[in-house]
Amino acid sequence: MTVIEPRWRVGHSPLVRITTPVPRRHPGYFAKIESLGLGGLKARSALSMLVGARRRGELRPGARVVESTSGTLGVGLAYVAQSLGHPVTLVVDGELEPAMRNLLRALGATLEIVERPHPEGGWQQARLDRLSRILATDAGAYWPNQYDNPDNAAGYHGLADEIVAGLAAVGIDRADVLVCSVGTGGHSSGVGLRLRQVWPGLRIIGVDALGSKIFGQPAGRRLMRGLGSSVHPGNVRYEMFDEVHWVGPREAVHACRALARGGFHTGGWSTGAAATVAGWAAAQGSGSVVTIFPDGPDRYLRTIFDDDWCRGRGLLDPPRTQPHEIDDCRDHTECWTRCQSVLAPHSLAGDGTKAAG
């Protein structure tokens, strides 16, 4: 097998000005369209994690790479790992779309499919349990552990640099607000911290999903995939965030569909959630707003873009156009909600200490 160095081929997605009026009219914001970069958003972190592991001797030549994924990282790993000469086994779950399963297999990945969610930790914990069993039977396999691997965040420094260069190319010398969806914490931390070095006054807004426990809500069933978590990933830099929004699936569906009709750049749950909050921030007169659209629409044609699927779940009803406000991240919420007091995990146990932000 010829090993192709993928470094120069990862990234370099376009930066596009978005004016689609979601969730209301706004003056526009900028979005990095990561689905148009080779390998997608998470090929950046896959490259960083695997090259780092190879450099440290943790990933041996030809060793198998094993990881849990809801889909997007799987594409990045399949693209990067096999270019570096490593077979890939991906632990996925029963809710992964058939089209994504087919794509991952077409890219050469072996799939281990978990058919039942964990009673408390949901699909995410069930995947991690299966992954542990695989590692126990293959001593030479390498687990990147995207949730707690600092190389994950480091892989997105180049994305931040591309944002700076892209804005400069259109005559904008700084961004005032960064809106980032949060799952493993990789791209939000990598991009956010790097941009704060360039623009110290940058305001950073985290976007989570209803049912996610990352920022203090109790874990629950999440209809939205690609953002949110049933665990507290070590990569999340809580002190970095000035505020957090939990976005619901109705708002995300509306955003994705409106973007498809009015802007021709759209995607899935994390893209719709990020677009909702970025449009809201732009409408507040917050200055120059930039966000990241993590994925494209292809895997969501039978969900977000399927009228019958959405109608059966009440997702075509009118969405909220502004968030509900709470003072404490632990206050219960069931709709798109904003909180300007961000808590770190040690504070969520109840000691009241608040992360700086």
Image: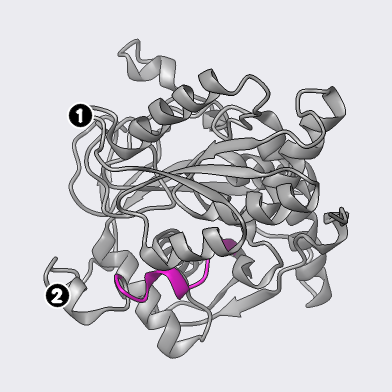
Residue 158 numbered tag: none
Residue in the image at 22% along x and 43% along y: 221
- Secondary structure at badge 2 equals helix
In the rendered structure, does residue 253 fall within the stretch colored magenta?
A: no
Residue in the image at 31% along x and 33% along y: 329
Q: Where is residue 144 in the image (x, y as percent from the top left)?
A: 63, 32
Alpha-carbon distance for marks 2 and 1?
28 Å
Q: Which residue lies furthest to the top in this view?
A: 351
Quarter of image, res 235: top right
- Residue linked to disc 2: 311
- Residue linked to disc 1: 119
Q: Is residue 32 left or right of residue 161?
A: left
The reply to whether residue 241 is in sight is no
Number of residues whose C-alpha sits closer than 10 Å to that of mark 2, classed few (under 14), some (14–19) or many (20 or more): few
What range is drawn magenta here? 290-303
Q: What residue type is labelled 1?
A: Pro
Residue in the image at 54% along x and 77% along y: 28
Q: Which residue lies furthest to the bottom in this view?
A: 261
Which of 205 and 115 lies nearest the eye of the viewer? 115
Camera-near label (2 vs 1) is 1
Q: Which amino acid does label 2 sit on?
A: Arg
Q: Position of residue 323 (x, y in %)?
A: 29, 56
Quarter of image, res 34: bottom right
